[in-house]
């Protein structure tokens, strides 16, 4: 596949697919772009919303055989004509009929998808109940396990019972249960190969290989911001991580501050919405201007925006010390969360084999 061109008006170029691409190739390209630009991952970002609408509209047309045939012959007007024909006949089988025939689609030109229509189509395209599933190339439907990591290098008690979390149900194969302790990658996982366990001493300040991440804040490779991948290794000499990108035979060397880990959390001490307390979810993005995480709560099927102090990270998560006033020399250090002390709402954080500190929950940031 080529690089997507979101400045183009050609549906194939928008998705980065050749004109002879099969349905699986088109869906793979759409899934990646739709997840990258989804409004829930990009709050208050008008460009992201427009891109999400654009890629959804492109796939809605090309995934329907009749619309695609008309588009190939006559362009957008042909696709609109096929769409209106589908509306008159009660909908076109196999596709998402109607956006071309909705109000605004007649007479005066082509109607483009609204944000609501794009979100509806996105949910429809991936089964309705699991809109964010299957992010890693046909790996959807994992089941109940955390799924945030392809390695057993993390210890500690997980939250468990995450069943139905679409952000983590992306490893596929109907394997169920936790991925921890498996020691290797199952076959057919999009080329993401599991690194062999290392005999080197454990580094408590290093994110383990196999952790699923998104890229953010890149300057020289800004085109990859929002892309997802898996950590392959850490290079101590450069203090960078090697990240293998989803669905691509490409790796990038990335600084820690340019990574967002998609880890499980438990919600705690929300006074205004007590029904959220105790719920588990998955971090999907960090909003630096608000100092909040956007978290997908699976069993409520909603995204909530929460401060770090209300988000309890799993034991074993590697996070960064931030905003510590009593010991400012610790700020910027990375460490592994060993335990959460409920009464004080603090973590025990292991910085090295010989150093453990206790800090408030709000002072540990991914």
Image (cartoon, grey):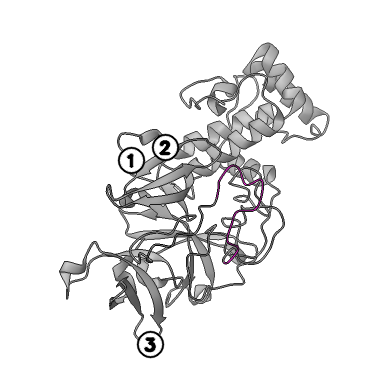
**Closer to the camera: disc 2 or disc 3?**
2
Front-lying residue, 269 or 326: 326
The residue positioned 47% from the left and 36% from the top of the image is: 250
Give the alpha-carbon distance from disc 2 to disc 1, as whole Å.
7 Å
Q: Residues within 10 Å of mark 1 (few under 14, many from 20)?
A: some
Residue 218, label in figure: 1
**Disc 2 + disc 1, Cβ < 8 Å:** yes
Residue of label 3: 343
Residue 328 quadrant? bottom left
* Magenta span of residues: 181-193
Element type where label 3 sits in the image:
loop
**Disc 3 + disc 1, Cβ < 8 Å:** no
Residue 124 quadrant? top right
The x, y position of residue 364, in whole percent, is: 32, 68
Residue 48 visible in image: yes
Q: In which quadrant is the C terminus drawn?
A: bottom left
The residue positioned 62% from the left and 56% from the top of the image is: 169
Give the alpha-carbon distance from disc 2 to disc 3, as whole Å.
41 Å
């Amino acid at each position: 596949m080529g690089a997507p061109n979101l400045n183009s008006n050609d549906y194939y170029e928008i998705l980065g697919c050749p004109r002879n691409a099969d349905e699986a190739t088109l869906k793979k390209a759409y899934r990646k772009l739709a997840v990258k630009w989804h409004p829930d991952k990009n709050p208050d970002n008008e460009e992201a919303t427009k891109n999400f609408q654009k890629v959804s509209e492109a796939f809605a047309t090309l995934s329907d055989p009749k619309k695609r045939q008309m588009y190939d012959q006559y362009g957008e007007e042909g696709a609109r004509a096929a769409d209106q024909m589908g509306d008159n006949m009660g909908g076109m089988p196999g596709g998402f009929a109607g956006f071309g025939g909705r109000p605004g689609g007649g007479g005066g030109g082509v109607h483009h998808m609204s944000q609501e229509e794009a979100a509806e189509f996105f949910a429809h395209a991936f089964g309705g109940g699991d809109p964010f599933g299957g992010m890693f190339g046909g790996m959807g439907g994992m089941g109940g396990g955390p799924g945030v990591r392809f390695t057993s290098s993390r210890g500690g008690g997980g939250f468990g019972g995450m069943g139905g979390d679409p952000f983590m149900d992306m490893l596929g194969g109907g394997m169920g249960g936790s991925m921890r302790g498996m020691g290797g990658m199952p076959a057919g996982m999009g080329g993401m190969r599991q690194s062999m366990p290392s005999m080197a001493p454990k580094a408590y300040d290093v994110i383990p290989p196999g952790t699923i991440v998104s890229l953010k804040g890149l300057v020289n490779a800004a085109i990859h911001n929002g892309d997802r991948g898996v950590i392959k290794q850490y290079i101590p000499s450069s203090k960078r991580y090697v990240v293998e990108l989803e669905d691509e035979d490409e790796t990038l060397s990335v600084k820690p501050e340019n990574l967002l880990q998609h880890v499980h959390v438990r919600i705690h001490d929300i006074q205004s919405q007590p029904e959220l307390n105790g719920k588990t979810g998955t971090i999907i993005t960090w909003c630096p201007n608000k100092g909040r995480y956007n978290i997908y709560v699976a069993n409520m099927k909603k995204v909530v925006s929460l401060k770090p102090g209300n988000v309890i990270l799993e034991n074993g998560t590697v996070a960064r010390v931030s905003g510590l006033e009593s010991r400012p020399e610790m700020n910027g250090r990375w460490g592994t969360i060993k335990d959460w002390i409920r009464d004080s709402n603090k973590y025990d954080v292991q910085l090295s084999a010989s150093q453990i500190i206790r800090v408030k929950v709000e002072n540990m940031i991914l």
